[in-house]
Amino acid sequence: MASPGSIGPSRGRGHRRTISTDIVEKARLEVFVAEDSSLDIEEFLNNRPRPTHLSVINPHDLLHPVPALSSLAQRQHLYFDEDVPVFIALQIFGINDDSVYKSYSSRLAVSLEVTAVENQTQRRPDGSRPPDGPILLYQKTIQDKDGEKILWRDGDTRLAIWKITVPLGHPKARPSNPRVVFSASATLKLLNQNTRLPANEYLSGRQALNVNILESFGAETPEKLPYLSALRVSRVIPTQPAPKESFSPLGYSSKKTFPIVPGLNFKLRGNKTPRKANTENLFAHLTLEVTPQLGCNFEIRDVILECGGVSIASMEASEKMFPTLLQVMDEITFLFRIPNKSSPSQPPNLLKQIVVKLKGQAMVSDVCKPLISTHWETNIDFSSRHDSLSASTHGNPPSLRLGGRPLSSQSNVTTSLVEPSGLTITFTAMSLNVHPGDIFSWRVFVMNKSSRARRLALLVPPKRRKGEGKILPSIPHNMTEPVVEDAALFSSYKSQHLEAVELIPLVNDVRIGPLAPNACHTAELRFIALATGVLTIEGVRVVDLMTNDITECRELPTVVCT
């Protein structure tokens, strides 16, 4: 009789493997974020090249968890506020009967969790404390009937693919070097006791398994019968029945990590008309900037503001305005009129809750065009003096100068107006009392009245000195060159009159645009005064960056420095 130790460990002896246990051990789950934004996954599966390793029966020998999708190109990085399509693929081997597969697929529950984490390999430059843990962006449990499900079969390999659109949003915390983690897991719900078990719940004969259940008998001779020592059998009486689990998790889960960057920057400002006006109107200026991290052009499809449940379109919105294409580092400003209802008995509420909704598309490549949908909620206090423009100190705000009418010459604020080829440009001096050494600014308001978008540059050329630009007559070649002593040349140079510099522009190159048709933009020119008296600037040069046309603005405010 064989000794008890002659038989190896009895793995699988006395244990009947079922389809449920086989699915739990052999099923494979994977998350895919395809590079092609309009990918038809069913067409991709039917037209894909067939690798040779698909014929391998043992799943552990496969090179990829889901070989049918191993050649699918995936995204390199994602963007905040992006609506990214995510594919969750579940691969199951060895179920040939469609009714059995349908019975078990109805018991599957797939869950997806999307979190934002901070890369711990880099320290924060400001020394601030990193977030305590991952920031949850999205979480969903997908049932068999949820989502866009695609079934695909290749022999004894069955593939179920769910397509889900995940809104990444924008976390309130700002992690350094953030990354997005897609974690997918699946569970197989157990049947209720009242539910009838399928007739073929147990594995059928002559079907390949991923483990060898007769491996423990490999060391035995054919003459010996299977033997199990009585010493290995012990009776265990449980004190109470063990609770039955309601589900069985799959032994394989998927986790994918992608770097994520912000593609757009927003700036929202509020202005109101002066109190001397008959009606007090509120205006919101939304400035949109394309960040360098986007790395491609951005197409704006729609921009809407909501205030008090009312949707507000921009004042320059038209059918030809959208879509608008922006390049990297471009800025564009939209002007909105905010409703301000008031009654004699109740003063108007100047604290407005604003919701910014923007839809656009990043043109990464011909096939990769991520959709970015922003939903940003914020408050604007129009009662603040910083956000509003007062008529006594700043003159009329830009929202009232859309018609392009210049201010009166008797006003304390001096402005001038030029209209080069459909552009209305207004210069307003923001400071009344200027002293030597003070820094003052001019506000430049630009209105595009043409039918095309504009990209402009404002330049302040240096002041020309007296005698500059004169051309001296040339000396004939046959004339002997005069000899001048160094002392006489130095004395002549010292006796020359040098003009003092009166104004120095601190910002000599201001870029504006792209400025959509019927859109406006506000910029600022800053100067420093170095002399007393009436100081002037010869002109401001306006350069159209698209056509290279140059226009000189000569009528500018006069600065009195005391």
Image: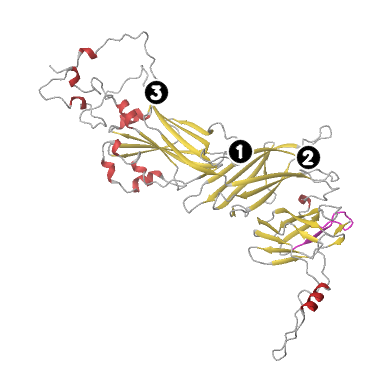
Q: Is residue 412 left or right of residue 225?
A: right
Residue 453: quadrant of the picture: bottom right
In front of the other: 89 or 525: 525
Label located before the other in sequence (2 or 1)? 1
Do callouts 1 and 3 mark residues in contact (Cβ within 8 Å)? no
Q: Position of residue 126 (x, y in %)?
A: 62, 40
Marks 1, 3: nearer the viewer: 1
Residue 384, which numbered label? 2
Q: Residue at x 48, y 50 (%)?
A: 368
Q: Is residue 365 left or right of residue 448?
A: left
Label located before the other in sequence (2 or 3)? 3
Residue 469: quadrant of the picture: bottom right
Q: Secondary structure at mark 1?
A: loop
Magenta residues (range): 404-419
In this rendering, does residue 527 appear at all? yes
Q: Amino acid at mark 3?
A: Phe
Which quarter of the image is occupied by the C terminus? bottom right
Marks 2, 1: nearer the viewer: 1
Residue 127, which numbered label? 1
Q: Position of residue 27 (x, y in %)?
A: 34, 32
Q: Residues within 10 Å of mark 3 (few under 14, many from 20)?
A: some
